[in-house]
Image (cartoon, rainbow, N blue to C red):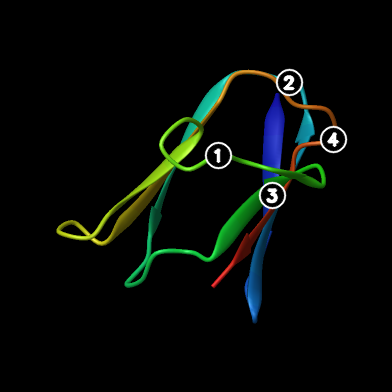
């Protein structure tokens, strides 16, 4: 089983715990993030994530990860 903890503020932090599985995050967002980091490593726009302005949605696709801590800077 995998669980997620979310903390929003100046930066959005999402932390996964439990079984490591590939996943897709779909996050409602009115603006494109300045950066996204997973376990301290910057994720490349277009490869690991994309922002759909029309749907106001951020989509992050992840196959493998260490800790499972995302930090999304606005």
Residue 67 higher or lower than 11, as above or below? above
Which is more toward the observer, 39 or 17?
Answer: 39
The residue positioned 36% from the left and 71% from the top of the image is: 31
Q: Which residue is mark 3?
A: 37
Q: Which residue is mark 2?
A: 20
Count neighbours of disc 2 (C-alpha within 10 A) and say few if under 14, some if 14 to 19, many if 20 or more.
some
Q: Secondary structure at mark 2?
A: loop
Q: Measure the alpha-carbon separation of dots 1 and 4.
A: 18 Å
The residue positioned 76% from the left and 21% from the top of the image is: 19
Which of discs 2 and 1 lies nearer the camera? The answer is 1
* Mark 4 vs 3, N-terminal side: 3
Is the Cβ of the residue at disc 3 closer than 8 Å to that at disc 2? no
Which of discs 4 and 3 lies nearer the camera? The answer is 3
Query: Image quarter for residue 16?
Result: top right
Q: Measure the alpha-carbon separation of dots 2 and 1.
A: 21 Å
Which of discs 2 and 4 lies nearer the camera? The answer is 4
Q: Is residue 61 left or right of residue 10?
A: left
Which of discs 1 and 3 lies nearer the camera? The answer is 1
Q: Secondary structure at mark 4?
A: loop
Is the Cβ of the residue at disc 2 closer than 8 Å to that at disc 1? no
Q: Which mark is residue 67?
A: 4
The residue positioned 26% from the left and 62% from the top of the image is: 56
Count neighbours of disc 4 (C-alpha within 10 A) and say few if under 14, some if 14 to 19, many if 20 or more.
some
Query: Image quarter for residue 4?
Result: top right
Q: Which residue is mark 1?
A: 44
* Mark 3 vs 2, N-terminal side: 2
Count neighbours of disc 3 (C-alpha within 10 A) and say few if under 14, some if 14 to 19, many if 20 or more.
some
């Amino acid at each position: 089983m995998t669980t997620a903890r979310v903390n929003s503020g100046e930066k959005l932090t999402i932390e996964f715990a439990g079984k490591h599985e590939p996943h897709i995050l779909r996050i409602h967002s009115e603006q494109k993030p300045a950066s996204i980091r997973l376990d301290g490593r910057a994720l490349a726009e277009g490869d690991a994530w994309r922002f759909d302005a029309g749907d106001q949605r951020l989509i992050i696709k992840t196959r493998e990860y260490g800790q499972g801590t995302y930090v999304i800077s606005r």
